[in-house]
Image (cartoon, rainbow, N blue to C red):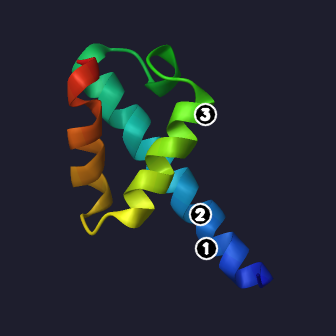
């Protein structure tokens, strides 16, 4: 894995976590880690990477059972 590829993955994961936290905060008033564990965040990100949907849409569908 090249440094550029790793940076892209890190950036994408950071964006995913920010969107996840924004959506949880908007719906519940509490951020992502009030609802799910860091391990769950990693699993959700892996699921997102296997999906063919935009990140924000994936996150909105993902958090539905929690709100």
Q: Position of residue 20 (x, y in %)?
A: 39, 39
Q: Are marks 2 and 3 in contact (CB under 8 Å)?
A: no
**Label 2 neighbour load within 10 Å: few <14, some 14-19, many 20+:** few
Q: Nearer the viewer, mark 2 or mark 3?
A: 3
Q: Position of residue 25 (x, y in %)?
A: 34, 24
Q: Which quadrant of the view contains residue 31?
A: top left
Q: Residue 8, which numbered label?
A: 1
Q: Residue 62, which numbered label?
A: none
Q: Position of residue 45 (x, y in %)?
A: 48, 51
Q: Is residue 8 left or right of residue 48?
A: right
Q: Residue 11, which numbered label?
A: 2
When the figure is inspected, residue 10 is found, relative to residue 62, above or below; the finding is below
For disc 3, the marked residue is 39
Quadrant where the N terminus is found in the figure: bottom right
When the figure is inspected, residue 42 is found, relative to residue 11, above or below; the finding is above
Q: Nearer the viewer, mark 1 or mark 3?
A: 3
């Amino acid at each position: 894995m090249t440094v550029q590829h790793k940076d892209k993955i890190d950036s994408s994961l950071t964006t995913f976590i920010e969107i996840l936290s924004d959506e949880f905060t908007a719906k519940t008033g509490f951020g992502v880690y009030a609802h799910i564990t860091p391990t769950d965040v990693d699993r959700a990100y892996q699921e997102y990477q296997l999906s063919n949907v935009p990140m924000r849409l994936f996150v909105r569908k993902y958090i539905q059972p929690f709100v």
